[in-house]
Amino acid sequence: MVTRKNPWDVSVTNCDLYCHHCLQRMLAPLPCQLCSVARYCTVQCRDQAWEYYHCVECTVGGLLLVLGVFCHTALRTVLLTSYKQLSEVFLHPTSRTFQACAVGEEPNQTHSSDYRSVFSLLSHSEHHRAEHKFLCALTSSALCKKLDIGLLRSMGASPRTEESVCLDAHEMQILGSAILLHMLQLHCNAQAVTVIHEEYEEPATSLVESCNSSRLATALFPVLSLLNHSCDPNTSVSFQGRCAMVRASRAIRKGEEVLHCYGPHKLRANVEKRQKLLKDQYFFACQCVACTQEQALTNHTIHDFCCPKCHSLLKVTCFMPSNSGICSGGV
């Protein structure tokens, strides 16, 4: 789902240079025939997007920009799933658990990116604030009501007569529950699809360039979500279109865990800031090697400057004698 800086931004941004369906770089973008938001690289991408999801999104494009990227991505997830599969997953409790075996445990099975694996991602609903959960529930309910029958038809549901054009309570509950679940999941599992672009310093004739990373889209990668976090990871993630590629950034020994950085990296923030960011968004206290070592170093440094009796920090006052160029410290 392509991301914009704000709902009413009409300037040309980096994301406008990429197809809104396949996320490939465009030379001559083709706009949607009914809206000015979606742009595509080919007629095939435009037709596929319309068939799979844009026929519904196009009718509420402005509303989705206001509701935010998580709501839009949750809706896209539901639209790309057939109503039959969606109802089976939500109505059968035995199908709710995605059995993710360890690598090598069952060689004939591989981790997949089907809807069942997306459904099984943790939402941490018990940790979200009540106000946030209420707002997400209200948003999903209002969105389903606004979309009405077009949502079911795009997902392959049975056709309705002209006299019956509203979702019944049962269908509304399934669709609303799915959108609500994915909105909560995205808080902890959303992956920013980024692209690297070059920027030249002023003046324009300068040959000095710098590479910056731009947020292009927001997506769910259920296999990528299985990787645990480290502030000093041993992998790096890059993107090619809609595919995420995980590469080792250093040698990984046999039996060593493959780790991924959720955002706060040890080179960009200190341990206190990283801990706060991870706690606020992912609801866990990071205990990776980088955090453990930095906390131990910080605690050791503070301990060296504490009073041995009351353990309070020492207060140092510097003074400069009038007849000397030496600065002495006094407690």
Image (tube, helix red, strand yellow):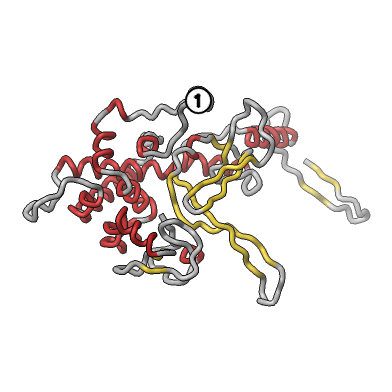
Q: As drawn, is 232 to the left or to the right of 276?
A: right
Q: Quadrant of residue 98?
A: top left
Residue at x-position 53% and y-position 25%: 104
Residue at x-position 35% and y-position 39%: 115
Q: Position of residue 306 (x, y in %)?
A: 71, 34
Q: Residues within 10 Å of mark 1 (few under 14, many from 20)?
A: few
Q: Secondary structure at mark 1?
A: loop
Locate the N terminus and report the quarter of the image it occupies.
bottom left
User: Eyeballing the image, is 51 above or below 262?
Assistant: below
Q: Position of residue 250 (x, y in %)?
A: 68, 39
Q: Residue furthest left?
A: 163
Residue at x-position 49% and y-position 35%: 226
Q: Position of residue 213 (x, y in %)?
A: 57, 57
- Reading the image, the residue beneath label 1 is 107
Between 92 and 263, which is closer to the camera in this rendering?
92
User: Eyeballing the image, is 240 above or below 86?
Assistant: below
The kind of residue on which mark 1 rests is Pro
Report the number of numbered marks.
1
User: Eyeballing the image, is 126 above or below 5?
Assistant: above
Q: Residue furthest right?
A: 323
Between 114 and 293, which is closer to the camera in this rendering?
114
Between 78 and 159, which is closer to the camera in this rendering?
159
